Image (tube, rainbow, N blue to C red):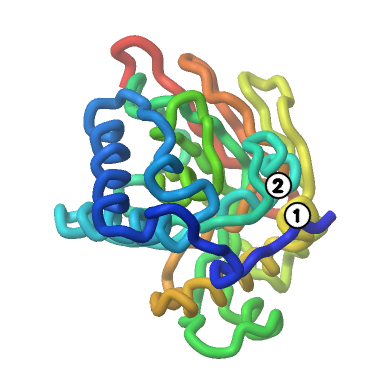
Amino acid sequence: MTASVHSHTDIVSRGDGDSAAAIGAAIERLERAYRTRRPCPPVRDLLGADNVAAAYAVQRRRVEARTAGGARIVGRKIGLTAPVVQRQLGVDQPDSGVLLDDMRLAEGSTVAAGRLLQPKVEAEIAFILGTDLDGATDLRTIRAAVHHAVAAIEIVDSRIADWDITIADTVADNASCGLFVLGDRQVSLDDIDPVAATMALYVDDEQVSSGTGAECLGDPLIALQWLARTAQEFGDPLRSGQIILSGALGPMVVAEPGRRVCAEVSGLGRVTVRFGEGDER
């Protein structure tokens, strides 16, 4: 199964979303939601629902503020790669966000109650890069750049109330980044076929989602290729050592307090995370 992939340069800006005032207002709205832990209205009224360029400008400035405050960039995420997730959220193209060190949780960790606003979980294949991707982006080069793969759980979160998002809303909100957990088993691509990998997601031992690598733009490496090209277009190429969350392998599910989530990806093993309730940490 494949999904439509749009270049950022194909998006036509509209409204006043490119103005400094509109971008600044969108930043303030999202930052207030982040600080207060209270979801905010969408920002598409400020940027335009399809103005991806302005949305990435918002994302970039918000990430710059986080890094100026001491956070460190550790990788990227590719979002909205599975057609079923695109249908869940009402969008029709992938996006990307920036992973910071304070978003990473250790395997088996508990997410403190109240840390996130409206989290959902999805299972993915994460790629750890062994070389920079700042030149050729053919699939052979992309594959060779991957040092190893691991199973991953991404905990997405939206600062936008009720997940009422267009592509501009989620991009501005750093592709709805929340937290992520990586499995302990590191596997070379010589030993796994990402397309054929199967995924099962469990909540308290009940299977709630399933899929395969083919759900991720037809091939998780194609998703990585899209990200490598997009990152170069923006003058910020992917670097050795970065973690790349390549996209959901099946439907995402709501993360409920007091539950344990486990993802199994064939060839990569298991990864788990718990969600606290009340004062649990």
Mark 2: few/some/many CA within 10 Å (<14, 14-19, 20+): many
- Alpha-carbon distance for marks 2 and 1? 6 Å
- Which quarter of the figure has residue 235? bottom left
Q: Give how far across and how far down residue 48 sits, in percent.
A: 47, 49
Tell me if label 2 and label 1 are in contact, CB under 8 Å.
yes
Does residue 183 show up?
no
Q: Residue at x 24, y 42 (%)?
A: 28
Q: Name the residue under label 1.
A: 213
Residue 249 circle label:
2
Name, please, the residue furthest toward the front. 15
Q: Which amino acid does label 1 sit on?
A: Gly
Camera-nearest residue between 112 and 222: 222
Name, please, the residue furthest toward the left. 69
Does residue 141 show up?
yes
Camera-nearest residue between 23 and 56: 23
Q: What residue type is labelled 2?
A: Leu
* Left or right position of 227 against 68: right
Q: 137 above or below 279?
A: below
- Which quarter of the figure has residue 138? bottom right
Q: Which residue is drawn at 40% across and 59% down?
A: 54
